[in-house]
Image (cartoon, rainbow, N blue to C red):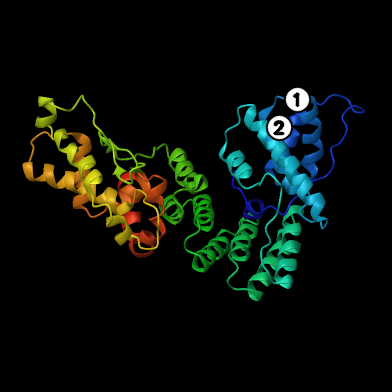
Amino acid sequence: MKLCGWLLWAVLAACAGVGAAQNAPLTDSDRQHAMQLFDEQKFAEALPLFERLAAERPKDAVVMERLGFAILAGAAGLKDREAETRERRRARTVLLQAKALGDNSNLLQVLIEGLPKDGSVSPFSANKEVESVMREAEAAFGRGDMKEALDGYLRAFALDPHLYEAALFAGDACYKMHRNESACEWYERATQVNADRETAYRYWGDALMTAGDNAQARSKFIEAVVAEPYQRKSWMGVEQWAGRNKLSLSFPKITPPHSVSPPQTGADGNTRIDVNLDPAILGDKAADEDGRSAWFIYPLNRATRPAGLFAKEFPGEKQYRHSLKEEAESLRMVADQVGKKKIAKLDPGLAMLVKIDDEGILEAYVLIGAADQGISQDYAAYRAGNRQKLRRYLDEYVVPRLP
């Protein structure tokens, strides 16, 4: 199910639970009716049923998930911020119960990640008029009044053409009204406001897929990953696209057998770097024949880089970290070494490394396919000047093409 942008920002709270003790036990038909109401976006009608179903069937993970969602959607118009915060916390508790029951859906994960433990809500704008208009539009969206919601989002965008959420949510409202072409136009406008946020690309892909344009949908889902590859939700679009087309994502397997521990400064002031070698490769004749012996260059280069080099490369950073430059440089030295030997039956991982390096997208591979906490800090700077290389890596190596 497509998660609407208004839920990501959660202007939401909920009605109080409806007591089930005074009613006859609900049947499977009642459960089916609740699910139908939910699928039709009639959250206010569905909420009382889900409250009762949760009370009677507390181990039903799907019921708990949809109850949490309905709580969020049920009171978008609440003006009492304390009540809103309280109910957002309640929704989070219900969603965590669903997770504990084994629910691991993308919807559940995104909802939980978007709900702070304290239930707080971030404002859309520091401009009081824009904030008020957005809240009113969100309330209309929560009631299912898409026309009023769209009017509100358009007003907010007219007041502040740099408000990403106004354009994004206008697209959502159009999408709910089955106006796919208009939805795509507003999603595109949101990406023009901020090209480095994933949501509009992903929703744009959803709209294109609904319209039957799988090829263009694929390109938008790839853009979502390019925008924010370290967010779980950024990958939801390409994963669902692949699943619906009976395809699977694939990732190049380039795994250095040797590693390097982070530098540590001892009591004597000297810096120590430990190199961890895989004994299975050392002295192995087969490793010489298929090129794997060249992997020794990888930890050697990382361990012997001059101590002051990082400070020169990143003058604004006081503490060393594993960087894109260090990793790509070390991998490239391995690729250069095996490339010179012209080995007939090169190890598949090394063959892939050489190919990716020859195509000029080694850094893109490292950032998306092999980044750690240190390397990921270099992503924004690289993306700013190399967006096309990131697209190419995903397009040619990760996201399969339609047959």
* Residue depicted at 33% across the width and 46% down the height: 269
- Rendering coords of residue 224 (x, y %): 46, 54
Which amino acid lies under the numbered mark 2 shown in the image of this protein? Val
* Residue depicted at 70% across the width and 42% down the height: 69
Q: Is 63 drawn above or below residue 216 in the view shown? A: above
Left or right of 55, for residue 192:
left
Which amino acid lies under the numbered mark 1 shown in the image of this protein? Arg
* Residue depicted at 69% across the width and 52% down the height: 10
Q: Mark 1 touching mark 2, by CB under 8 A?
A: yes
Whether residue 31 is visible, yes or no, is yes
Pick the residue in front: 382 or 40.
382
Q: Is 381 drawn above or below residue 264 in the view shown? A: below
Q: Which residue is mark 1?
A: 57
Pick the residue in front: 65 or 272.
272
Instruction: Give SS at disc 2.
Output: helix
Residue reaching furthest to the bottom: 159
Quadrant of the rendered image containing residue 145: bottom right
Q: Which quadrant is the N terminus positioned in?
A: top right
Instruction: Give SS at disc 1.
Output: loop
Which mark, by number, is residue 63? 2
Pick the residue in front: 183 or 155.
155
